[in-house]
Every structure is written in C-alpha cells, then in structure tokens.
Image (cartoon, coloured by chain):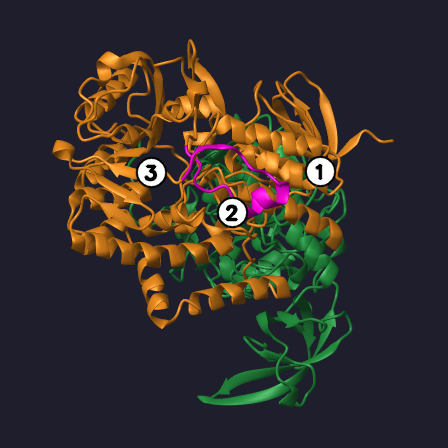
Amino acid sequence: MTDRYDAIIVGAGHNGLVCAAVLAAQGRRVLVLEARSQVGGAAITRGFADGFSISACAHLLYQIQPEVLRDLKLHPPLAAEELTTIALGDNGEHVRIHRQRVEGVSDADADEYRRFSKRMLKFAHLLHKLLIRPPPRLGTRDWRDLGALARLGLGVRALGRNDMREFLRVIGMNIHDEATERFENPVLRGAVCFDAVLGTHLGPRSPNTMLTYLYRLAGNRARVSLPRGGMGMVTARLAQAARSAGATIETNSPVQRIVVDNGRVVGVETDSGERFDAYTVVSNADPKRTVMDLVGARHFETTFVKRVGHIRAKGNAAKLHLALDRLPEIAGFSQDDYGQRIVIAGDEHRIERAFNPAKYGSCSPEPVVEMTFPSVHDESLAPDENHVMSAIVQYAPYDLRNGWNDAAKRAFFDSVITAIEKYAPDIDQRIIAAELLTPIDIENEFGMTGGHWHHGELVLDQFLFVRPVSGAAQYAMPLDGLYLCGAGVHPGGGVSGAAGRNAARAILKRETSR
Amino acid sequence: MIPGPVHQGRLESPFYARLKELDTVNEWHQWKGYTAANELYCAETEYFAIRNATAVFDLTPMTKYRITGPDALDYLDRLVTRDMSKVAPGRVAYAAWCDDQGQVIDDGTIFHLREGEYRLCSQERHYGWLLDAAAGFDVDVAHETDDVAALAVQGPTSYSVLSQLGIAGLDALKPFGLMHANFRGADLVISRTGFTGDLGYELWIEPYKAAALWDALFEAGELFGIRAIGTIALDMARIEAGFIAVYEEFLPADETVRTGRSRSPFELGLGWLVDFKKPNFNGRRALAREYRDGSAWQLVKLDIEGNKPAHHAYIFPKEKRNKGDIGFITSAMWSPVCKKNIALGTVRAPYGKPGDALWVEIYYQREMHWSRKMAQATVVDRPFWYPDRRGATPPGPY
C-alpha cells in the first residue's frame, strides 16, 4: 500500500477539523498536521495564570453552523445559552437586549427594535442560505452555478416587494445611518453599531457595516452562547469527531512548506524535515500565508498572487484576559447580569471616535469592549471564589505607528482598564493577573496574517464570489491539488465550521466529477 | 526612493543630433516619450536601404529592463510562455508574456547578456507588471531604457559594415546570438536580431559613446550604402517579414476593456512559443484549456491579388458577402521587394489554414470618389520575405 494520504490538512483550527471529519467520514485517508501542542487554532482554551484558564482568542459561540453539528452529530455542552447583551450606560442605566426584546429604553425604541430585529433576522436568514453553500461561480454556463445564482435572485425576490427593496437599500449601507434613523436611546444605538464593527477594521460610519451586522446575525439567529470548558472544548469535540471518523491528527508538527512538483501539490514538509505525501493538501491557514509562505508565489500566476497580496487583513482587535480575586462591582448589576455578554461602547459617536486614531496607526484612547465573565457559568476556568474575565477590545491596529513595544502595550492596557473602571470602579484592585494579546501577539500565537480573526476583512469586495479573491472562490486554488478551508474563504470568520464543511464538499465533488 | 526631477516634454535620444542633421522633411512623432523620426528624407528610399544596403534605425526609445538576481531565470520562466532555461548566456529569445487568462500583454526579446543577467526589450512599458510578477522571487528589475543607447543596423551589407568597423568575431555570431565587443573602452553589445526579417544586427551601448559609435558606423558604411531610416520604412519591412506589432495585430491584454478584444499566443501564430512542459507560467491554465478546446481567432498572412493595398479591409469566406465577414486586415502594403500585395489579418476559427482562399473587400479612392473591389486572398504560412542570408553564418559580404 502506498503511503500517500488522500488529504493532508494544514492546521487543526475548527475549520480544518470539520473538513477532516467530513472527508474522513467519506472514507478518505486524512492527516491533520497542527503546529502547536493543542488542536483548535483560534478556538482553544488555555491557561494564562496559575489556576486560571480562558478561551484564548474566540470566546463566544455565535455561529457554529447547525448543518455542521448535524453532519458530525455533535452536541457541544453549553455552560450558558442565549446570553443577554447588556450595553452599559451611565448611572446604571443599562440597556439589555435579549432576542427581540430590549429593556431600559423607551417604548418607542423597544417597538422599533422589535420591528428592526425581525426584518434583520429575515435578511440574515437569506444570508445564512448563502453561507452554508459554496458561492456560485460567475460567468460560467454550469447549470449548478446558474441554479445557485437563480436561487440567490429568487431568495431576494421572495422577501416580498417591501423587504426586497429594503434589503437592497441597506445591504451596502453603514450601521450608523441605520441605527440613528431608528433609535433614540444612544446606548442602544451604540450597542447595535458595536455588533457591526466588532472584530473589523471598520467604524460605524464605514460603508459595508450593515453586511457585517447581518453576518453576525446570520450564524445562529443572533444567539450567543458560552461553551462549557471554553472554546477549546468545542474544537476538542471536533477533533474527536474527526478521529473517530478515521482521521489522524498530529500535533507539534508545524508545516514548513507545501511541496509542489511539476505544477501540482504533492504533499507537505514539516519543520523537522519530515515529508508527507498526499493527493490533496487543504490549508486551514489564511490565504496570504498559504500562497506566499507555505506554497510560494512563484507556483501561481501573477494576477492571482497580486490579488492575494491585496487581501485586506489587518487586525484591529486585541484580546484581554484578567484573573480576578472576585467579581468587580458594576452599578445596577444583579448577580445574573455578570454571566451575560457585556458591552462598553457608549453611543455611535464614541465608537467612531475610538476608530478614528486606528485609521492612522494609533490605538483608541477610549477603547470599546465586549466582555464576559465565563467563570460565572463555568467553575472549571478559575479557582473557587475567583473569576476570569475575557474581553475583546478595540481598536488596536496591527500596524501601530511605532510598533507594539512594551510601553505601547502597557498604555493600551491602561486605557482599557480606565474604560472598564468607569462602570466597574474596583476592577483594578480585583486583578490578580492579566494578559493582553495585541494583533501582533494573535498573529504570532495563532498564525493569522495581520492578526485578523477572519483571515481577511469581511467586506463586500472580499465576500461571496470574491472571497478570498476573484476567480478562486470555490475552495480549489489555481494550483492542482491545493484547497483552502479556513476563514479566509467563503463564508468567512467566526467559529462556524462552514468554510471547512464547504471545502470538504467541494473536494469530494471535484473528485467525483473527474 | 528620492524622486529625481521629472523630465517634461519629449526626450531626445543620444542620436537625436545626428538624425536631425540628416533630416530634410521634419516628420517626427512621439515614441514612449522620445522624439522619433517617421522618415528622414523619403520613406521609400529608406525602405530600399533596408532591402538593398544597410539601414540604421534609432532603437533607443525601445523599452528595456535589466533583470538580475539569483532567481532571474526562474522569474523569467514564470513570466513568459517559452522555456527560458534553454536560452544560454550569449543568446537572445523572442518571447511573449500573458496575463492569467492567457492573453498576450506584449511580445519582445530577452537578451541573456551574461550568466544570470538579462535584458528584456519590448515596445510597451511593463514596469508595473514586471514588479507584480516579482513577488516571491529574489530578483531585481530595473528600468534602463534611458541608460542604453541602441541602434538597429539592418540589411544585406550590414555584416560588411560592422566588419569594416573592426568587430572581431562577428563572423561566428549566429541569428539570435549576442556578443560583447570593446568600442573605445565601452562595452558594445551586438546582437544578431532585428525587426526587418533580413540579415541585421542591433547595437547596444552606453549613451555617452552613442554619437561616436554613430560616426564610426557611418564612416565604415560609406561604401556600403548606409542610410539612417525612420519608422515608416521599418514598418514596411516588418510586414514583409510577417512580424506582428502591438496596436496593429494585437492590443496589450491589460489595455483591452471588451471581452474578445485581446489575443492569445495561439491566436497570434505564436503557439511555438508556448511550452506546456513548464509546470507553471502566467496564462498556462487558460492556454492549456484553449489548446484543448481550440482558439477563437487565427492570425493570417495573406497574398492578395491586384496591387491595391487592403488597408483595414474586411475578410470574407466567399466572394459573395452574404455570409458575413470572418475577420479583418490589421496591416497591409504593396511589397516592392516581393512584388506582391500582402497583408496580415485576423480571422475567426476555423478559417485561416494555409492555402485557404479567402476574399477581402478593398476600398480605394480615385479623385475623391471611393471604389470597392473584392480581391482573392490566399493564406500563406511562410514569411513573405525570408532571404537565405538571414540564417547564414557567417553571412558573408554582399
């Protein structure tokens, strides 16, 4: 028997694991090579201080695709489901958003939010249908592509005349205009805007932020949950599913390069010089890293390389982990509130002002924050009485003007603490240990170019038919035997598994059409 | 990079003063920023210098790039469609380069000056494309158009002229070969290349020696009928040679807007330059598909009855035009040396096989009034002009 794998998957991120599981379940001989000692990529749980663990990059489960769970028969145990979003306001006047209900605002706002939310979910549902399939190719006469395009058109049309008009009106818009048009409560406006710009290099007034808002809703109808044991548990389950389907997973095996011979991919070589052969190599790494570093630009054609080089992937979000001796005091909070998703964003202007310096390579002096205290639900993360806090803070641009040195990190850390202190005055005294991951740290630890969570900004010009780049949106790269399965390909980022599942299906389809 | 002063207005080549001295008609045009002569005294007379004696053409405005670095060969191999590893130092390769869709961006010559050191010459400028193509290669691409003065010395007596100049070793220089000579302390590169389809050479030297080279050349060529020429005469010669020209037979792919207006190498008769044995080059995937499925267009050389040049004529499969046209003429002329009415054109597949008898609709004007005639046009597969001396080494005196 030849020692050649049907598929080697580079990187055991959640998408790589989903792809491996789907391929292995179809009887393919699959090897997953992971650089670090632990599977999971950016969805892991790890220690950061003595006795304290945390979801080190992604920390909330928004959008694992129901189709992925169903296909792999997975039921990740959740510590808490359908978290309420609490947008903090001055003097304890917080706004609480749960499903389509908002508390802490005027009746007019609450009604308007209900209408808004209903319509947005309808649009998000349409988007969801696009996300679970490979995007159709443009300019072909293949009936499958034409069919998919027709379905897309029909889907938009089926919204009904009014909603279709509204969909086409808003899809390229910015969230600021939409939120200020609808809501009078500034904290509610801020909370809506915050959801659109979280994890992006966009401010509320940037075009395209309606799309990012809908994208967030599209995953799982806006339901946010906390997995028990952190995000690492989810990927551990995925790894289990892949293994039991027959895939081999090797950790501590960083892939040095993807080997090309006579115009096709034939395998990979690890840092230790070990060579593995395969008919297909699927990269869970981002498109730039895959094309430029792992394969090498010379093996592709010039325009393709240029397009890949132009993928916008500069992270702007940092991750803050705190070990706390106990929960801080937040005005107007009940015990239950600490277990929810807490947003410090102020109004839409404050978010935009936080974004402004990031355009010019500086950090926000007043960052905006999404934080959770996962240990409220999950005692495995911290010792008794103690707690952990996990927060996404922005904006912290990847290419900070004078670089991310210790002083810059310290200064940004202080401004985040100051922002939190406004609502939790004793937070500084509660801290036992802290860890701040800048986009540079995220790039280094998780191997994501530019420290971008989504392997590339989620914007209309890098979406659907043109993700990662025009002419290569069907998971197969323009190099025989090479595929992408990470967040850099359709449908994009978030712990959804959709890219991995789509990629696996594309590979299987291509095999049969040979 | 510190930007230098931006030159405003037309540049003058280092040969400009010499050309100006010979010029009697004051017919000039702009060629990539340089002033270049359409003709200097009479285009027809200049044309006969190419075919009967030695013609000297100022090639300085021709775009030139120096390509060096450890990956220079790999870089060029990925850039162009032909196999560059077969081009040894001291050799010149005619090559075409394509975009990812396999459409020709331009054609040109690549000089392997010394081991690992190349010069790429083309009609158009491609610095942006060449830099884009350099991603992932350890290669240095420098634009050196202004740093190299160049002359084409073409015609049956050109070998004699250069021998008279005292170039040692010229007798061994084969077509598409290049050699280094010493011209008064400067490196003079001589390549046996040209755009006339005849015996001829191109001379490359540093600009400060340009005028001296010109003078020495004209002194050496005095008894061999040497003459300076402009672009009109050169264009006549290249049509006879069956050479394609950008903006005539094709447009650079990156400058076309409508689909179907660019051309692949196969469609330009350059299929022999496409080497599918190379695992990767720009356009390979698209060209492999085209090779399998067939091309849409075919470049044709046409021998047309009568003596009226078929400028801009439509091409038809039959004398009756009711079936519609199948293509059009891109370059046409009455060839004095072949005594033939010749043209280059582009026709849709499956037309254009050698021997095909097609028809062209020629419009011509007599005392303001336009007339039209249908003329039979036969597809030929050989260049209209291909003298034995073009391939002979040594070419021998004339």
Chain A: colour as depicted: orange
- The secondary structure type at the circle numbered 3 is loop
CA distance separating discs 3 and 1: 35 Å
Q: Report whether residue B64 is seen.
A: no
Of A478 and A237, nearer the camera is A237
Question: In percent of the image, x 17 and y 41: which residue is there?
Answer: A349
Residue B254 shown in magenta: no
Return the chain for callout 3: A
For mark 1, what is the residue? A24
- Which residues, given as a range, are shown in magenta? A60-81
* Farthest-out residue, left: A91
Return the chain for callout 1: A
> In the rendered structure, which disc, 3 or 1, sits on the residue that comes first in sequence?
1
Of B91 and A429, nearer the camera is A429
**How crowded is the residue under tag 1: few (<14 C-alpha within 10 Å), some, or many (20+)?**
many
- On whether disc 3 and disc 1 are found on a single subunit, the reply is yes
**How crowded is the residue under tag 3: few (<14 C-alpha within 10 Å), some, or many (20+)?**
many
For mark 3, what is the residue? A198
Look at label 3 and name its amino acid.
Leu
Residue A70 shown in magenta: yes
Question: In percent of the image, x 70 and y 73: which residue is there?
Answer: B303
For mark 2, what is the residue? A490
- Quick check: B240 left or right of A65? right
Query: Residue A196: x, y in percent?
Result: 32, 44
